[in-house]
Amino acid sequence: MNLNDCTILYHGSNVQVEKPELRPSTHALDFGAGFYTTLNLEQAKNFASKVAEREHSSNAIVSVYKVDLEKLKSSLQGLWFESPTEKWLDFVSDNRNGKIVDSHYDFVFGPVANDTIFKTFIAYQNGILSKKETIERLRVKKLYNQLVFKTAAAVEYLSFDRSFSVKV
């Protein structure tokens, strides 16, 4: 792996994760089951703190990885959402509603439907907002991103770099 071609990804947890594992999800997530990472360090720190609180742990740890995104994208089957679109909204909504048990994608990238947009998302799911209205509202918000590795083949592209603790 050429270090100049690498992208840094972060994963927030209450443990260091040197070797990511694919585990079944216990609840509906934006992009379904998989190993979730982000390009945004602050998002990973925040998630690490939330996991630590949920697990009643004093450990909040961010694991750092390197990945050659161009190689990943050209070698495996992925779904890439640069911004909130109708296709993204349908995909996330279906995953959160349990309509997609799993997809045929090795990885999925796109905006996070996180706590800051939860009310907008619920309004859409309850038929209060149309797709167009929902997308318009989401585009004005600062949305973080996530890159989810959904298959063992995709996880192989991750190279563990280091980890560090975050204050809970």
Image (spheres, rainbow, N blue to C red):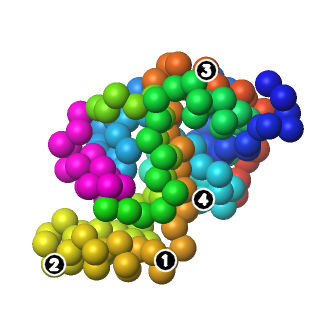
Which of the two labelled residues, at mark 3 and mark 1, occupies the earlier sequence position? 1
The residue carrying mark 4 is 43
Element under disc 1: loop
Assess disc 2: are there few (<14), some (14-19) or many (≥20) residues with their C-alpha within 10 Å of its C-alpha.
Answer: few
The residue carrying mark 3 is 156
The stretch in magenta equals 87-101
Report if the CB atoms under discs 1 and 4 are less than 8 Å apart.
Answer: no
Residue mark closest to the camera, 3 vs 4? 3
Which of the two labelled residues, at mark 3 and mark 2, occupies the earlier sequence position? 2
In this view of the protein, which residue sits in the foreground, 164 or 25?
A: 25
| Rendering coords of residue 51 (x, y %) | 51, 49
> Taking the image as drawn, is residue 108 in sight?
yes
Q: Identify the amino acid type marked 3.
A: Glu
> Is 31 inside the magenta-drawn segment?
no
The residue carrying mark 1 is 141
In this view of the protein, which residue sits in the foreground, 70 or 43?
A: 70
Which of the two labelled residues, at mark 4 and mark 2, occupies the earlier sequence position? 4
Tell me: residue 96, above or below residue 83: above
